[in-house]
Image: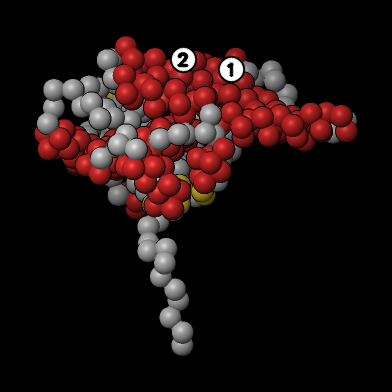
């Protein structure tokens, strides 16, 4: 795996220090400000779409096409957000300008009703890939269309549009990585966009891209279970090791970056401080959606059996 001019221990240290700094030194009054600005405008643009699923899908399409995709030369996985720190006075001006009656107080459109506290079908995402899942949704959309069931058709079409948006986000991530000279990261994004992941790295990128988008941009409390990644990724890991595509050290570095990236999208604070949302000493979900919202990764020995009593 190409890691540029860095040595492995040096790169790992950079990842760890950045993650720790995000959790301990990030200014409390920090906004994922670009998210609020984009949703503020897009919510108005799609307000005339009467169907909530179609409004959600079209809103996602527009958001994905405009959001920035920052990249650093130390990134193995692509997915960062733009943040900005305000003084209390600047924050008040900011909220007065961008928070309106089509947005929730968290700065996301009211048509996004997802409360978090859930998991996704990660194994299907890895096994099938986004394009196949989109095609499956399209088949149901066509069936509901033929049956004349407009409500279900619109719901599934909204799903199709969200799959489209995520695929486009991965392609845009590939372009950003390519422009930064991160050719291997770009290739992983392309693989994840075009079908079922064929490598450990592309599978981890797919997981991170979906998790990142959900937690950083659309869910007001994105407590998300990532599930049994040890089981979902083991076959691709073994395949890459056997074929010499990946070393154990490379895989460990990718996992380190995944762990570190999860910390970068966090706000800074403690859960009980959420009741003081908007207070100058509380990051709160009104500023960064992923505020004290841990993402749960389940790991265990799959061969262990319950003890008999």
Q: Residue 66 carries which label?
A: 2
- The residue that disc 1 covers is 44
Q: In which quarter of the image is the N terminus?
A: top left
Q: Residue 230 carries which label?
A: none
Whether residue 96 is visible here, answered yes or no, is: no
Query: In x, y percent, where is residue 84?
Result: 29, 23
Secondary element type, mark 1: helix
Q: Residues within 10 Å of mark 2 (few under 14, many from 20)?
A: few
Residue that appears at 40% across and 35% down: 199
Query: In x, y percent, where is residue 284?
Result: 36, 40
Residue lying farthest to the front in this orientation:
243
Query: In x, y percent, where is residue 127?
Result: 53, 41
Q: Residues within 10 Å of mark 1 (few under 14, many from 20)?
A: some
Say left or right for 138 vs 279: right
Residue lying farthest to the top in this orientation:
179
Mark positioned earlier in the residue sequence (2 or 1): 1
Secondary element type, mark 2: helix
Dividing the picture into quadrants, the one containing residue 74 is top left
Q: Nearer the viewer, mark 2 or mark 1?
A: 2
Dividing the picture into quadrants, the one containing residue 268 is top left
Residue that appears at 27% across and 15% down: 181
Residue that appears at 36% across and 28% down: 79
């Amino acid at each position: 795996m190409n890691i540029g001019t860095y040595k492995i221990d040096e790169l790992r240290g950079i990842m760890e220090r950045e993650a720790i700094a995000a959790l301990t030194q990030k200014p409390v009054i920090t906004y994922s400000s670009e998210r609020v600005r984009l949703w503020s405008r897009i919510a108005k643009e799609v307000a005339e779409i009467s169907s909530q699923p179609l409004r959600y899908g079209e809103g996602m399409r527009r958001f994905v096409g405009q959001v920035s995709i920052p990249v650093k030369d130390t990134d193995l996985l692509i997915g960062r957000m733009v943040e900005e720190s305000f003084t209390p006075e600047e924050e008040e001006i900011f909220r007065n300008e961008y928070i309106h009656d089509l947005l929730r107080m968290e700065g996301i459109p009211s048509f996004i009703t997802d409360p978090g506290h859930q998991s996704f079908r990660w194994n299907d995402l890895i096994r099938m890939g986004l394009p196949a899942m989109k095609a499956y949704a399209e088949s149901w959309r066509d069936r509901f269309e033929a049956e004349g069931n407009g409500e279900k058709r619109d719901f599934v079409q909204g799903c199709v549009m969200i799959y489209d948006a995520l695929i486009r986000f991965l392609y845009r991530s590939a372009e950003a990585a390519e422009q930064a000279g991160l050719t291997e990261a770009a290739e992983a994004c392309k693989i994840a966009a075009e079908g079922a992941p064929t490598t450990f790295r592309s599978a981890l990128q797919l997981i991170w891209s979906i998790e990142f988008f959900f937690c950083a941009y659309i869910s007001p409390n994105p407590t998300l279970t990532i599930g049994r990644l040890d089981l979902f990724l083991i076959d691709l890991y073994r395949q890459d090791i056997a074929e010499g595509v990946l070393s154990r050290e490379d895989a460990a570095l990718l996992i380190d970056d995944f762990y570190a990236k999860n910390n970068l999208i966090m706000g800074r604070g403690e859960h009980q401080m959420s009741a003081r949302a908007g207070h100058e000493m509380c990051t709160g979900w009104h500023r960064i959606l992923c505020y004290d919202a841990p993402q749960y990764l389940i790991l265990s020995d799959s061969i262990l059996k319950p003890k008999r009593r």
